[in-house]
Amino acid sequence: MGDKRNHTGTGLHDPVLEKLGMEIASGELPTGHVLTLDRIQERFGISRTVAREAMRILESMGLVQSRRRVGITVRPIEAWNVFDPKVIWWRLSGPGRGAQLRTLTELRIAVEPLAAGAAARAATNSQRSHVVELAATLRRLGEAAELTEFMERDVEFHALLLQASGNEMFGALADVVAAVLRGRTQLGLMPHKPVPEALDLHEAVAQAVADGRSADAETAMRRLLAEVRTAMLPD
């Protein structure tokens, strides 16, 4: 969804990008705040080239806008690329975590049940077999409380269903779902062990997709995300 060529990997601008990105996402640098390359160079002790690259990436995300004789201005949230995985992470890491979790969970509830139903109709035989294998792996990892590996396989599970739906719009949301699933684990928002109901529902979704039962796949995914919503947004 974002320009991943610009802001994956490592580079001299990364610490600057992370710091400024989190300050903007948290509201510490509010809408309308003006940044200059000179101040960024001085603050972080970096070259003008590195400062300019960091600003270019933030501009590609919609967080800032550079204008001659004005400077680099922080833009309102309506202008941000809110689907960019880095923007999602910065928002999850700050005081706006609750709002970000709510909006991401609502997006998932709107999309993933339909994607699961579509996958039951459109998935290849290989995809049907793989989703069942992943559900069994999630059962094993979840019961063993191996949360890091569980999270990675859960990312794979949900991405597979989005991509197997045959809808390129759904498939394009795989990175967004991955960002919130990883964020939930890395920010300590997962229970010590996944609840049994969640493991059961992963298996129910997988089996319905494997069997081509579209309505059952959609219903099971909706129930799974309702459980997620309750766990993540108890209030």
Image (tube, rainbow, N blue to C red):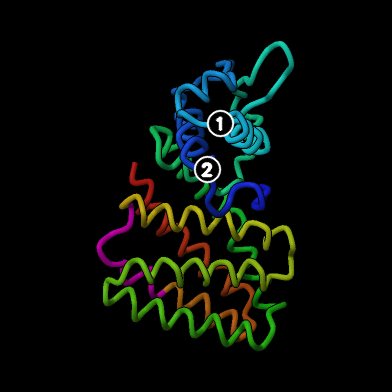
**Amino acid carrying mark 2 in the image:** Leu
Q: Compared with residue 173, is residue 63 higher up or lower down, i.e. above or below? A: above
Task: Read off the residue under disc 2.
Answer: 12
What SS does tag 2 mark? loop
Q: Residue at 63%, 31% (x, y): give it.
A: 52
Residue 57's x, y, as percent?
63, 38
In terms of image quadrants, where is residue 9?
Answer: bottom right
Q: Is residue 191 magenta?
A: yes
Residue 63 in sight in this render: no
What SS does tag 1 mark? loop
Q: Nearer the viewer, residue 203 or 68?
A: 68
Q: Compared with residue 22, is residue 159 higher up or lower down, i.e. above or below? A: below
Q: Nearer the viewer, residue 60 or 160?
A: 60
**Amino acid carrying mark 1 in the image:** Ser
Task: Read off the residue under disc 1.
Answer: 47
Sequence-first tag of 1 and 2: 2
Marks 1 and 2, how far apart in space? Answer: 10 Å
Residue 161's x, y, as percent?
60, 71
The crowd level at tag 1 (other Cα within 10 Å; few <14, some 14-19, many 20+) is some
Q: Which residues are magenta?
A: 189-200
Q: Quadrant of the C terminus?
A: top left
Q: Nearer the viewer, residue 8 or 130?
A: 8
Q: Nearer the viewer, residue 178 or 220?
A: 178
Q: Residue at 52%, 24% (x, y): give it.
A: 40
